[in-house]
């Protein structure tokens, strides 16, 4: 797993007490395969991810993840999920190598098998 995942920081406009689901997965469609893509490619992928989330009816909110100094940033989505299996499938569909799984105010990076 990319060591940068362990130091990632997140920004969002929702307060923790507004999260009504016990399990949240943070997934991005940006930079699939851990390869840097153009902003245009990443924006198109993000639109596709939104369509995927809407199709499945998942509750979500915008999250921006990045390095501790936020010199590197990637927009993503915190998605309410009932299972790790759903989060793994979502990450795989969008070419990701990892996602973040959280609950009770704690996030943990999870490498996709």
Image (tube, helix red, strand yellow):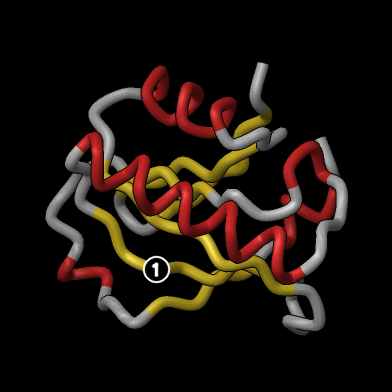
Quarter where residue 94 is shown: top right
Q: Describe residue 22's horizontal placement relative to residue 111 as left or right.
A: left
Tell me: residue 37, above or below residue 69.
above
Decide: few, some or many residues near mark 1? Use Cα within 10 Å; few <14, some 14-19, many ≥20.
Answer: some
- Coordinates of residue 108 in the picture (x, y in percent): 55, 44
- In this view of the protein, which residue sits in the foreground, 21 or 91? 91
> Which quarter of the picture shows residue 111?
top right
In percent of width and height, residue 63 lies at 46, 68
Q: Position of residue 61 (x, y in %)?
A: 31, 64
Vertical comparison of 3 with 65: above or below: above
Residue drawn at 67 percent across, 16 percent down: 113
- Left or right, 68 with respect to 19, comes to right
* Number of callouts: 1
SS of the residue under disc 1: strand
Left or right: where 84 falls relative to 42: left
Q: Position of residue 2 (x, y in %)?
A: 84, 43
Q: Quadrant of the N terminus?
A: top right
The residue to which callout 1 is attached is 62
**99 shown above or below 69:** above
> As rendered, which of 43 and 18 lies closer to the eye?
43
State which quadrant residue 72 falls in.
bottom right
The structure residue drawn at horizontal position 17% and vertical position 41%, both measured from the top left corner, is: 57
Which residue: 32% across, 44% down?
53
């Amino acid at each position: 797993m990319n060591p940068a995942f362990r130091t990632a920081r997140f920004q969002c406009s929702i307060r923790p007490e507004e999260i009504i689901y016990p399990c949240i997965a943070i997934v991005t469609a940006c930079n699939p395969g851990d390869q840097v893509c153009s902003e245009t490619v990443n924006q198109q992928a993000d639109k596709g991810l939104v369509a995927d989330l809407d199709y499945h009816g998942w509750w979500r909110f915008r999250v921006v993840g990045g390095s501790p100094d936020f010199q590197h940033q990637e927009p993503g989505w915190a998605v309410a999920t009932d299972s790790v299996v759903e989060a793994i499938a979502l990450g795989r569909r969008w070419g990701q190598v990892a996602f973040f799984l959280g609950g009770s105010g704690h996030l943990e990076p999870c490498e996709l098998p």
